[in-house]
Image (cartoon, helix red, strand yellow):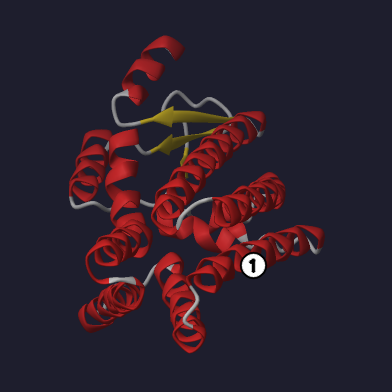
Amino acid sequence: MGRKGNAVQDSVACRGQLPRLTISAHACGKSGGILKMPAPRAALRHAVPVILEAVIAPLGLFYLVLTLWGFRGALIAALAWSFLALARRLRRGERVSMLLLLGTLLLTLRTTVSFITGSAFIYFAQPTAGTIVIAFVLFGSALVRRPFTQRFAGDFCPIDPEILARPLVHRFFVRISVLWATVLLLNAGFVLWLLVTSSLHAFVLERAAVTYSMTALAIYLSIRQFVVMMRGDGITVQWGSKVEAALLTVEA
């Protein structure tokens, strides 16, 4: 069963998809359970297409067209990419990530306002204002104990409902909502400062560097806290398919 399960997981990972996170029993009868986390490469194969499709591609296309044909052409190119990506998934009956859906909606609003005003400053100030709003939404969801971050988790790693129902996991998402809200507010502050001090071409690259760096740090802290929380709940956390055999050998 173990080899068959690993083969299935490896096959799914090779297609860029991740198996759902579930807690299984120890083979040696030990209390608690085993949570097998995806190998880092498998996790990247799953997450990178989501981020590339919803974030990196429209940004890169915007910057390319901005350099060649100007601001309005860049607006149209970025928005067209998002709509095509959304239409492609809907036509194939594929799951639309929350990141792509919200990104397309916000980009449509930003582009409409920017076309009316003709202002690049307003175009880039809008997502900063949106980031601040999202940060306060995250703070609010944490206060009412209905963490919004839990809705985004499936975009990057499918999680079994039984895991989500665990009290400590719910508490984790509440705390992570506060973490991400704080990161978003800090990011908004840096981006706003860059917006008023940098040129348009420099700002596009500087904003990407700041945003991606802070996002990477928040992702690392989120994963680390999740692993610490699961181990504190008596769950053995393993990474990848080769860790299980080594761990069982030590336990035996």
Question: What element does badge 1 sit on?
Answer: helix
Residue 209 x %, y %: 44, 43
User: Which residue is labeled 1 in the image?
Assistant: 129
Visible in this render: residue 18?
A: no
Q: Residue at x 32, y 43 (%)?
A: 44
Left or right: residue 207 compared with residue 77: right
Q: Residue at x 58, y 35 (%)?
A: 221
Residue 244 sits above or below residue 250 on the image: below
Q: Foreground residue, 34 or 106?
A: 106
Residue 34 x %, y %: 48, 33
Residue that sits furthest to the bottom in the current view: 116
At label 1, counting other C-alpha atoms closer than 10 Å, the crowd grade (few under 14, some 14-19, many 20 or more) is some
Three-letter amino acid code at the position of disc 1: Ala
- The image shows a total of numbered marks equal to 1
Q: Quadrant of the C terminus?
A: top left
Residue 133 sits above or below residue 185 on the image: below
Q: Residue at x 30, y 66 (%)?
A: 66
Residue 228 x %, y %: 61, 30
Visible in this render: residue 192?
A: yes
Residue 70 x %, y %: 30, 71
Residue 151 sits above or below residue 221 on the image: below
Q: Foreground residue, 179 or 183?
A: 183
The quadrant where residue 27 appears: top left
Q: Residue at x 51, y 41 (%)?
A: 219
Q: Quadrant of the N terminus?
A: top left
